[in-house]
Each structure stands twice: as structure tokens, then as C-alpha cells.
């Protein structure tokens, strides 16, 4: 299975891709305001790469439940300087040399190839980010009916993450309801696959995300996590985004800064169900967990 995103090609099976979250927002639920300054966001992104991120997901509008929308101009003001600086670092020849980390003075500089993703629902922001050097569009509004975003993705041959959501961030947790959440999310993926390829996006450009927490109750989220394997029939990479999400608090009462263990549990269990991309705030811990889980699963497969 191949995932193409402009100049990048990721061929599976391979170790799971870890996507590091770079929120350039004042109000994201976990780290809002910490990286609103472009230089701080870039420094954070480079730290995530040093920890093992192979994709950086840059977003300028919070999609937490109830978040207020921001204008196109404001979103562009937040994300474009970050995308441009990161593209200048990584994409002159597709690779970059990162400096030694102060905490690891014995570690030599290493080369990295890193794909940049723009987390946006706005076509104009996606276009500007792709022009600036992004390779992937991460779209939580993939249920839209207007084709403008998809035409831009097709034009740039960018990767496209189509996420399932019920409603908008402002309304999605107002009594979400399904007859069978796993079946309905699968039907959404099937319909999107047909619609997006008809728009001119190659199937190899597509990644599917079931949208944990986006218009789902705790029980819906648990059902999706338990039955993730059912989405493998589409032969497209699957992305899991559970990092620090509020369904963990609903399950265990854990505050935002206490949700890492549960986030890692979901990520490692999802590997066995066929997840290829894990989106996270906590890159170092996620990389360590999933690499060990992959080693164990490989030995189990050898025995099987």
C-alpha cells in the first residue's frame, strides 16, 4: 500500500508514521498559546522531529468541541510563517541537518526528511500552505459538499487526510447519534473514496481518519477503537488521533496533563488493528511505545 504526498512516498508495511502536532493557536485544548509565536512553533516542530516525528501537522484554528472559528486572514497569519520557515529548513533538497540537542550532547547531527501537513478546513489556507511547502492537507471537514478543497489537493497532488465528523466543532458534541457508528463511518469512507477519486485525487493520495472525538460519545469512540480493523478493507492508510482527547477524561477522569498513558494504550492497541499513522502531541513517548509494540507484533506474526 502506497501513500503519495507530492514529493513524498510512504510504502506500507513499514513502521508506523508518527505525526507531531504543532498548534499555532491561542485556544487549543492541550497546548493553546504555547506556540502561537512563529519562532516558538518552529522550535517546537524541530524538537518533535528530533524525537522521531516524520510528519509535522501545523494548525492555526482549534477544532476542540465548542471552539470559535477564526477568519481566513487570521489563520493564514498564524500558519504561513511557520510553514515557510519549516519548508526552508527541510525542503531545499528534501532533507535537513538538525543540530545536537542540549540534552543529548553525545548525539551527532542527523539528517531527516519530514513532510509538512496543514491542518485546515479552508481551501484558501490549504492552497497557500501547499504553495509555501506543505505536502499534506489534514481536513476535519472532509464531509463537506463543496469540491474546492479537493480540486486544490488534486492540483498539487498533495496527500489528503479525510476525517469523519458529525457536525462542526461548534455543534459536534450536541447529542451525537448513530445507529451503528462503525458501519456509518465505514460507509462515509466508501463514499468519500468514490467522490474524491472522481474529483481527480488518486487513491494513493488518501488517508482515512475515523475522527475520534468529533461528533462521538465515549461509547462511540470505544466502539471505533475496538473495531478499527474493519476499515482496512479500503486499502488506504488509517490515521489515529487520540492524543490527550477528552473521551479519556470521560472514561477515567484524567485531566489533560494526565492522559498520556491512556493515549499510548490506544496507539499501541491500534497498531495491531492496522493503523499506519499516529497523530500525537507526545512524539518521544509515542515513538518509544509503538516501536516496541511493532517489535512484539512482528514476533507474534512470525509465530502465527
Image (cartoon, rainbow, N blue to C red):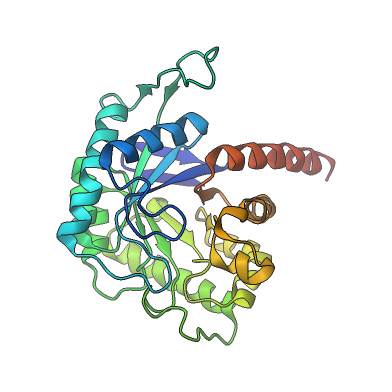
Task: Indicate the quadrant where residue 41 lies.
Answer: top left
Residue 13 vertical position relative to residue 271 in the rendered view, above or below: above
Q: Residue at x 34, y 64 (%)?
A: 196
- Asked whether, in this view, residue 215 is left or right of residue 68, the answer is right
Q: Position of residue 105 (x, y in %)?
A: 52, 14
- In this view of the protein, which residue sits in the foreground, 256 or 295? 256
The answer to whether any part of residue 163 appears in the image is: yes
Is residue 114 visible in the rendered image? The answer is no
Residue furthest toward the left?
73
Q: Residue at x 24, y 73 (%)?
A: 146
Quarter of the image holding residue 16? top right
Q: Residue furthest right?
A: 303
Residue 12 in the image, given as x and y percentages of width and height: 55, 42
Q: Is residue 186 above or below residue 150?
A: below
Label total for image: 0
Q: Is residue 1 above or below residue 103?
A: below
| Relative side of 129 to 248, left or right | left
Task: Give the image location of residue 43, x and y in percent.
Answer: 36, 33
Q: Quadrant of residue 68 in the image?
A: bottom left
- Depth check, front residue: 152 or 169: 169
Residue 248 percent across, percent down from the top left:
62, 64
Amino acid at each position: 500500500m502506497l501513500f503519495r504526498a507530492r514529493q513524498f512516498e510512504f510504502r506500507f508495511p513499514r513502521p508506523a508514521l508518527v505525526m507531531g502536532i504543532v498548534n499555532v493557536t491561542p485556544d487549543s485544548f492541550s497546548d493553546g498559546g504555547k506556540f502561537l509565536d512563529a519562532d516558538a512553533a518552529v522550535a517546537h516542530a524541530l524538537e518533535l522531529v528530533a524525537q522521531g516525528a516524520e510528519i509535522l501537522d501545523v494548525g492555526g484554528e482549534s477544532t476542540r468541541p465548542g471552539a470559535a472559528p477564526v477568519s481566513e486572514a487570521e489563520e493564514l497569519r498564524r500558519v504561513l510563517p511557520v510553514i515557510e520557515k519549516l519548508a526552508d529548513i527541510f525542503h531545499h533538497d528534501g532533507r535537513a541537518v538538525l543540530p545536537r540537542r542540549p540534552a543529548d550532547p553525545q548525539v551527532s547531527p542527523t539528517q531527516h526528511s519530514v513532510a509538512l501537513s496543514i491542518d485546515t478546513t479552508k481551501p484558501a489556507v490549504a492552497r497557500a500552505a501547499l504553495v509555501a511547502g506543505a505536502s499534506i492537507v489534514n481536513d476535519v471537514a472532509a464531509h463537506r459538499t463543496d469540491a474546492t478543497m479537493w480540486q486544490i489537493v488534486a492540483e498539487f497532488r498533495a496527500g489528503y487526510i479525510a476525517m469523519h465528523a458529525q457536525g462542526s466543532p461548534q455543534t459536534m458534541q450536541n447529542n451525537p447519534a448513530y445507529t451503528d457508528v462503525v458501519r456509518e463511518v465505514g460507509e462515509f469512507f466508501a463514499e468519500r473514496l468514490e467522490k474524491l477519486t472522481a474529483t481527480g485525487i488518486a487513491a494513493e493520495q488518501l488517508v482515512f481518519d475515523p475522527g475520534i472525538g468529533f461528533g462521538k460519545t465515549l461509547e462511540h469512540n470505544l466502539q471505533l477503537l475496538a473495531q478499527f480493523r474493519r476499515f482496512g478493507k479500503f486499502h488506504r492508510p488509517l490515521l489515529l488521533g487520540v492524543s490527550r482527547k477528552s473521551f479519556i477524561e470521560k472514561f477515567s477522569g484524567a485531566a489533560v496533563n494526565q492522559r498520556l498513558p491512556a493515549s499510548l494504550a490506544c496507539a499501541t492497541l491500534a497498531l495491531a488493528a492496522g493503523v499506519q499513522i499516529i497523530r500525537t502531541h507526545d512524539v518521544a513517548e509515542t515513538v518509544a511505545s509503538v516501536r516496541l509494540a511493532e517489535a512484539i507484533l512482528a514476533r507474534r506474526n512470525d509465530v502465527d
